[in-house]
Amino acid sequence: MTILVVDDQPNLVRVTAVALRMLDCVPHTASTVAEASEILNTQRIDAVFLDVNLAGESGFEFLSTLVTRANPVPVVMFSAHARDEIAAEARQRGALDCLVKPFSLDDLRTQIARITAHRAKAGLRPAGEADALK
Amino acid sequence: MTSLQIFLLEIPERARPVVVDAAARAFSGALVVDVTSVTDAAARAAGSGSCLFVIGSGSPAVKEALGMATLHGQSLWALVALGSELVEGVETVPPAEWNAPLLGRVFRSAVAQQVLRAENLRLVGDLKTLARRISHDLRSPVGSIHTSADVLTEISPDETETIATMAEIVKSSSEEIHQIVDRVGFLMWASAQPSPRTGIEMADVLRHVLQHLHHRIENTSATVTLPSSWPAVNGVAEWLQVIWTNLLNNALQHGGAAPAIVIAWAPDERGFRFTVTDRGAGVPTARQAALFTPFERLHVVKTPGLGLSVVQRLVALQGGQCGHERPAEGGARFYFTLPADS
């Protein structure tokens, strides 16, 4: 599974990428909406892990863009705040879930399983598999 | 209270001499200014010290002035209305009580309340910033350490490259936490227990800061040009070191390859103006407004770091102001002022 990690905290992005590789995922990383958009336009991405608070940008606004585009992509939000209203807004805007920092490998495993189930239900194949069928 | 400004708007003509007399009795050196509107007063009040707004109680501008008395979490002015029409939430003095001794007491009381209100708003803002922004800022590096530890417990011992990456992330995340705790702790102590200002040789402060930054200056091949002389100022040496360190670190980071940094000072109308100029790419226009966001506003405004908010608070605590300007020749210039008084 190919996952785009969008967060403005470089260390968090790096460690999430390493953790995703351990879980047999292929990570791409971005620290801004512009970088993330560029990757989404040029790469096949199965899911996005997106921070609620990007420097000077709203993760929620980008979430709305991601879930309403022609090829919607499943999104799991990251949040530094363990507050119900943030998780509620994330889900209301179309996120699969909202993961509160700090998160563990098991938390990421759970989210990947959730994304896999969601994609299967929606009849979506993983990016790598789709490429292999071309 | 030399920096007090008293704004007059639509007050009855016969009240004017009494108001001027009362202002002179209540405050030494207060500046009485006729303003044309509440917006005009707000523009004059921005960034200045305490302000008193005296307005005719029958004026439709009273409610506007009341609404703007607290703006963006800051207390702009104390408000006193003159007239027979009572206005809810505003200290209103009826014509029968328009005499200088009484008005002077009303003015002093209103300004004292405004000072307390401003302090209260700042403290509440500080608490909100601590509760929201700081917890947010700490969670990311803590999260990086947490997830790194988790990865390390599951990783094969022969994956040395990943182990090294994790160790490096743990180290730099710990440093990030240390820096946040250090800065916030310093600022909280400085705000809660302000040190008295004393006479300081700015040359000594700069010597100390440049020694501290010596390695970074060498590693970036930076050149730092200093003025030939320095003024003696009234301030807090430790705070001035933090201010200069932040501004110079910014110039070293954003001043381009081999940064050419110019440190200068000049007298200004209230004291001294100190500048740090670099020839880097400059600050993008979109980011300029939030550069010196007051610390107590960091719970609503997200900025990439805390450094310039720390500078803003430490300069304000010493009675000065700070800001950014774009030199005509390019780059960025950051400045702060210090009053000449003791």
Image (cartoon, grey):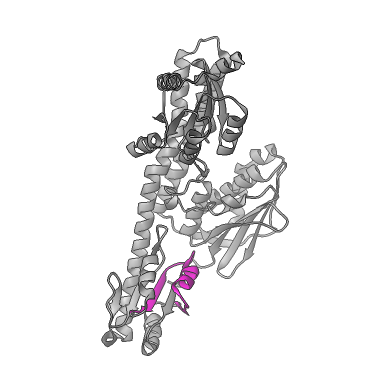
Q: Position of residue B316 (x, y in %)?
A: 48, 58
* Residue B276 seen from this side: yes
Is B27 situated above or below A84?
below
Q: Position of residue A109 (x, y in %)?
A: 43, 19
* Residue B79 found in image quarter: bottom left
Is A53 situated above or below B341?
above
Q: Which is nearer the eye, A46 or A21?
A: A46
| Residue depicted at x 46% and y 49% | B301
Q: How many marks?
A: 0
Q: Position of residue B327 (x, y in %)?
A: 68, 57
* Relative side of B161 to A115, left or right: right
| Residue depicted at x 44% and y 20% | A112
* Relative side of B52 to B234, left or right: left
| Residue depicted at x 35% and y 71% | B63
* Relative side of A38 to B300, left or right: right
Magenta stretch contains residue B6: no
Residues shaded magenta = B30-57
In the displayed image of the protein, which residue is found farthest to the bottom? B14
Q: Which is nearer the eye, B9 or A11?
A: B9
Q: Which is nearer the eye, B92 or B39?
A: B39
Q: Position of residue A69 (x, y in %)?
A: 52, 35
Q: Quadrant of the N terminus of chain B?
A: bottom left
* Residue B69 seen from this side: no
* Relative side of A132 to B129, left or right: right
Q: Which is nearer the eye, B306 or B246?
A: B306
